Image (cartoon, rainbow, N blue to C red):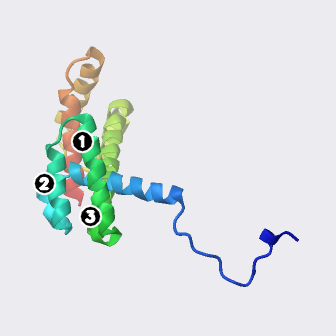
Amino acid sequence: MRPWDERPRDEEEEDFGPSRSEQRRNALDILKLAGQLVELPPSRIPKLNLPEDIIDEIARTRKVTAHIARKRQLAYLAKMMRRHGDEAFADARAALGEDRDRQRQEAAHMHRLEAKREKLLEGGDAALGELFDQHPELDRQHLRSLVRQARAEREANKPLHAFREIYKILKELEASED
């Protein structure tokens, strides 16, 4: 047996801390968070319970406009944030996470309305009849003329005024259902 193979097996292994890859991932996460904080409107920053020096540094970073200088300033901000630890930024992470969830929900809602509008434009009288059955209070004549106008605008490559108007009507209908 070789000498380096001889080591006690019953003792616990030494903890060397996070690997270099893990340290890099953590640093990049903090850098991403720093970028998100800088992009937030200034009125939202005080609500996030951030350390005072970080708030000041965010304000300084916003003032820098040159690309490389801004990148360097963001890296400095991230370095300052790493000194504070993760617990200092828990509120900020939670607020940014809620924003992403809300944005996803709003995007899904918008896509549903756009799909309904497309169904009206492509489906013809059957789709209109289905909508009128669900919402008898609708002005049938006005909506039918909007659908015709939207089709004509699309074919003629004109501004899509009727197209947008249909979207507004569908949005109002969905809001009244809630």
Residues 135 and 81: in front is 81
Q: Position of residue 129 (x, y in %)?
A: 32, 41
Q: In this view, does 57 lie to the left or right of 84?
A: left
Name above or below for residue 172 compared with residue 46. Answer: above
* Mark 2–mark 3 distance (CA, rounded to whole Å): 13 Å
Q: Residue at x 18, y 55 (%)?
A: 57
Q: Earlier in the sequence, mark 3 or mark 1?
A: 1
Q: Which amino acid does label 1 sit on?
A: Arg
Image quadrant holding the N terminus, namely: bottom right
Q: Which of marks 1 and 2 is nearer the N terminus?
A: 2
Disc 3 crowd rating (10 Å Cα; few below 14, some 14-19, many 20+) is many
Please name the residue that numbered disc 2 is placed on.
Answer: 42
Can residue 169 be spotted in the picture?
yes
Q: What mark, if any, has residue 13 been given in the picture?
A: none
Q: Which of marks 3 and 1 is in front?
A: 1
Q: Which residue is drawn at 20% across and 52% down?
A: 40
Name above or below for residue 143 compared with residue 46. Answer: above
Q: Which amino acid does label 2 sit on?
A: Pro
Residues 58 and 42: in front is 58
Disc 2 crowd rating (10 Å Cα; few below 14, some 14-19, many 20+) is some
Q: What mark, if any, has residue 92 been given in the picture?
A: 3
Q: Which of marks 2 and 3 is nearer the N terminus?
A: 2
Q: Which residue is drawn at 37% across and 30% down?
A: 122
* Mark 3–mark 1 distance (CA, rounded to whole Å): 21 Å
Q: Which amino acid does label 3 sit on?
A: Ala
Q: Residue at x 13, y 44 (%)?
A: 63
Question: Which residue is the extreme one toward the right?
Answer: 1
Q: Position of residue 95 (x, y in %)?
A: 26, 63
Q: Nearer the viewer, mark 1 or mark 2?
A: 1
Q: In this view, does 152 lie to the left or right of 123?
A: left
Please name the residue that numbered disc 1 is placed on.
Answer: 70
Image quadrant holding the C terminus, namely: bottom left
